[in-house]
Amino acid sequence: MKTRLMSVVVVVTLILFTAVAGFASGGHGHKAPKKVGILLVAFGSSEASAQVSFDKLDAKVKQKYPEIPVRWAFTSHIIREKLAGQGKHFDSPEVALARMLDEKFTHVAVQSLHTIGGAEYHDLRKTVGGFKAMGGFQKIILGYPLMSTQEDMEKIVDALIDIIPEKRKKDEAVVLMGHGTHHPSNAFYAALMFQLQLKDPNIIVGTVEGYPGIDLVQDLILAKKIKRVWLMPFMSVAGDHAKNDMAGDEADSWKSILTQAGIQCIPVLKGTAEYDSFADIWVSHIEGPLSHF
């Protein structure tokens, strides 16, 4: 495994330096003509249904910036390998940026499609910082993820309340499943739940891999004596986590755990990026980097 990882590092390094060398020599001492590009970077998903979310974001970005070429990259090497096995090839952010150098882009807005500024986002920051240090691009700037500022939080609270199914009654809970992370930015989930509950006390936010976890989510539901909940993913795509960890039939899924506790569950399998209100927030964040070009 280590040998394979080193091989990947060497290949990527060669690609980067070849691209930078080609870029630098192509100008013959003159500044290259300005060429702006957008790189959309998501964690990725191997679920075919998740492509709906990515297609919506892609269409919105191209509609708002029709003159700017758009490229894609997935940060998860596991997802990229799964997709490659299906005959679908996606670049890592490093390879995608190296290709953009080779295509003579001079200004690149790298837009994160992550939900919070967690570990994946900060790894992306390091990648962007590395390309900035190399000097191949005249400018390369990273845009904020979905939930970055208090203004974002307020928009997200309103958007979440707006997408709750109309059939849901006020004495029923809405449980939002976030991904969660070991990164300090995991605190955004608890902050989001606090602000949601100021408007609707029966909305509960939990995470698969962080805090709050399913045990606390269950305790909160039982404490309120709620017998029916709507399970909704607070993730850009309704992929593996939503289908299996949230709504699956396995004993450790949220649906199974809550059902075992006597709580009726109604899953809603739709990622946040499928809704205009969320997609618009991500797209609006591209304005930040582009405004500096």
Image: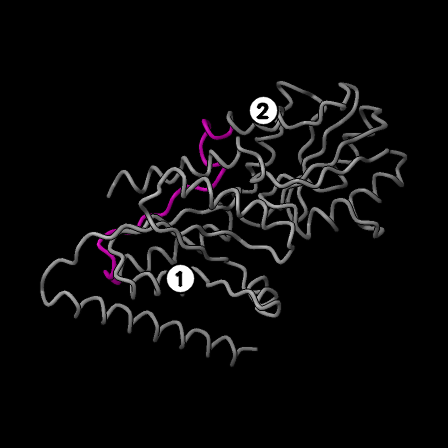
Query: Which residue is tagged 1?
Result: 96
Viewer-closest of 57 and 260: 57
Task: Look at the image and tell me in which quarter the C terminus lies.
Answer: top left
Is 180 on the left-hand or right-hand side of 104?
Answer: right
In the rendered image of this protein, does residue 29 appear above or below residue 220? below
* Amino acid type shown at disc 1: Ala
Residue 92, image x, y percentages: 46, 62
Label 2 neighbour load within 10 Å: few <14, some 14-19, many 20+? some
Q: Residue at x 13, y 58 (%)?
A: 31
Instruction: Report helix, strand or loop for mark 2.
Output: helix
Tell me whether the residue at label 2 lies in contact with that at label 1, contact meaning CB atoms closer than 8 angstroms: no
- Magenta span covers which residues? 134-153
Is 244 on the left-hand or right-hand side of 39?
Answer: right
Q: Residue at x 45, y 47 (%)?
A: 112
Instruction: Report helix, strand or loop for mark 1.
Output: helix
Q: Residue at x 69, y 21 (%)?
A: 201
In the rendered image of this protein, does residue 4 appear above or below residue 189? below
Label 1 neighbour load within 10 Å: few <14, some 14-19, many 20+? some
Query: Which residue is tagged 2?
Result: 195
Residue 45, image x, y percentages: 60, 55
- Farthest-out residue, left: 29
In the rendered image of this protein, does residue 12 appear above or below residue 141? below
